[in-house]
Structures are given as C-alpha cells and as structure tokens.
Image (spheres, rainbow, N blue to C red):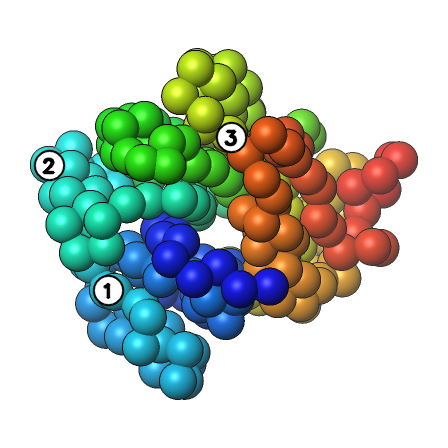
C-alpha cells in the first residue's frame, strides 16, 4: 500500500516501539515526523530506516512542555503542510518499588509523560486536523495491557494507562465532528529495552518471580500501520497485541 502525501508524527521515536513504528510507516510511504528528547536517538532511527529515512523529519521535543509541543506541531505543519496520523507513543515507568515508597517527583514524572504529554499532543493535532483540507485525521494512543490489569509495584504506570484509555474514549467522541478518529493499541511484552528485565524474571502477583515470554516489536509496528491505514469512516477503537504465552489471560 502506498501512502504518498500522508504525514504521520510519532512521539518517542528514538527507541523501542516508537522507532520500529516510525520505520514501518516510512516504508509504507508516509512522511514521518520523529519526536523525542534526544536528537542523536532520532538520527539513529533515520539511519536504521535506510533509504526510507529520506522522508523522515527529526524534531527534538519534550512532550511534557506545552511550548515545545506547540513548536513541534507548528514545525510539522510548516514543513509538511498537514498531519494525517499521530501516534502518541512516548511513555515511561517509575521504579518498581512499593507504592508507599514512591516520591512525589517519581509519580509526577510518569503522569507528565504518559498522560499530560498525550493530552498536549492530541490537543495540537486537533488544531491542525480540523482545519486542513481534506479535513480530519487519526490519533493512535499507545496504551498497555496495564490499562486493564496492573503488575506489582506499578501504581504510576498503571494509573496513567487507565487514564489514557479514558482520554482515548473522550478523544474518539470529541473528534467525530471534525472527522478525527482515535483508537488505542494495548501492548503486552514487546521485546524492547523496557522489557529486557523479563529475560531475568519479573515479580508476579503471587509474590514469585518468573521469566516471561516476549514478542517482536515489529509485530506491534505492523498493527499500528494497519490501524493508520483505515479510511476515516472506520476505526479500530481498541486493539490488544501481546506475547501469546505471557501471564495475562486467566490467572497467570
């Protein structure tokens, strides 16, 4: 499928799922704006894309800073003229320590990236998408299976992912009048730097520690590309992509 003329923006595009998805979108013919805090990481994504990297634009940005987010979307519009797809992917977790030991700063850091960052980017995307011709676009939020059930010692991450689910629903509803579709991909155990520790074993709800299976992050990227490929009259509201044998379904 060719997506010539379509523009996508991916936050957290310098590593993991963001990097894999940005490259997959480039290969589908999108022009892709790469957003992330470290320019060196964004340049590495462009390099990893090979010849497809010619259609990438790196814009170092901090999704927790309203002025930086506004500048990111202004740069997207001025350089590429429109925005068809936003993948709200940037995210982080807090240290896996008991809830009562978390500091206020640790809590706030996760909320600022995982929730406020998604809101700020969504708000700026609305401003572009509702006024462009053709009107509308698609927003895809990176949720998590933690939007449904928690892991031990994960209160900030789990709380923000539950909140993102609510924001996805509200965005989907509020975007209707502008032909803006919004969906969410909930990911479980994609093989990225964030899940490396699963190879050594991670805490389980029963107090044990267990090595967990992971899946190729490219499988997630392909799912996002599919969601992005639909016409605006169709929408994947929620999709779960997870390692088949991870301890999620049932009771472990």
**Which of the two discs, 3 and 1, labels the residue nearer the N terminus?**
1
Q: Position of residue 165 (x, y in %)?
A: 55, 25
Give the answer, above or below, for where 39 lies relative to 127: below
Name the secondary structure under disc 1.
strand
Judge whether residue 68 can be spotted in this image. no
> Residue 171 bears which disc, if any?
none
| Residue at image point 58% right, 49% down | 229
Q: Quadrant of the C terminus?
A: top right
Q: Nearer the viewer, mark 1 or mark 2?
A: 1
Q: Give the secondary structure at mark 3.
A: strand
Looking at the rendered image, the disc whose residue lies closer to the viewer, 3 or 2, is 3
Precedes in sequence: disc 3 or disc 2: 2
The answer for how far apart the CA atoms under marks 3 and 2 are is 24 Å
The residue under the point 23% across, 37% down is: 64
Instruction: Provide residue 107's location: percent of width, then percent of height.
Output: 35, 31
Q: Which residue is located at x 27 percent, y 75 percent?
A: 43
Marked residue nearer the N-terminal end (1 or 2):
1
Q: CA distance from mark 3 to mark 1?
A: 24 Å
The image's mark for residue 67 is 2
Q: Is residue 170 above or below residue 99?
A: above
- Quarter of the picture containing the N terminus is bottom right
Number of marks in the rendered image:
3
Badge 3 is on which residue?
182
Given residues 229 and 190, the one toward you in this image is 229
Local packing at callout 1 (Cα closer than 10 Å; few below 14, some 14-19, many 20+) is many
Residue labelled with disc 1? 58
């Amino acid at each position: 499928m060719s997506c010539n003329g379509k523009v996508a923006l991916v936050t957290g595009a310098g590593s993991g799922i963001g990097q894999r998805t940005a490259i997959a979108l480039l290969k589908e013919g999108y022009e892709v704006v790469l957003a992330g805090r470290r320019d060196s990481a964004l340049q590495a994504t462009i390099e990893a894309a090979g010849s497809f990297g010619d259609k990438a634009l790196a814009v170092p940005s901090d999704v927790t800073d309203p002025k930086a987010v506004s500048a990111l979307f202004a740069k997207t519009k001025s350089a590429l003229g429109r925005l068809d797809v936003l993948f709200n992917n940037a995210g982080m977790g807090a240290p896996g320590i008991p809830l009562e030991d978390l500091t206020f700063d640790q809590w706030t850091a996760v909320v600022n990236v995982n929730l406020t960052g998604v809101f700020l980017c969504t708000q700026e995307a609305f401003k572009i998408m509702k006024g462009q011709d053709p009107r509308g676009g698609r927003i895809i939020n990176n949720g998590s299976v933690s939007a449904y059930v928690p892991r031990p010692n994960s209160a900030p991450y789990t709380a923000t992912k539950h909140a993102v689910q609510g924001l996805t629903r509200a965005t989907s509803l509020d975007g209707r009048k502008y032909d803006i579709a919004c969906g969410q991909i909930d990911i479980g155990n994609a093989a990225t730097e964030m899940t490396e520790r699963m190879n050594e074993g991670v805490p389980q709800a029963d107090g044990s520690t267990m090595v967990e299976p992971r899946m190729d992050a490219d499988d997630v990227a392909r799912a996002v590309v599919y969601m992005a490929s639909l016409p605006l009259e169709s929408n994947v509201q929620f999709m779960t992509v997870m390692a088949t044998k991870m301890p999620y379904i049932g009771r472990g």
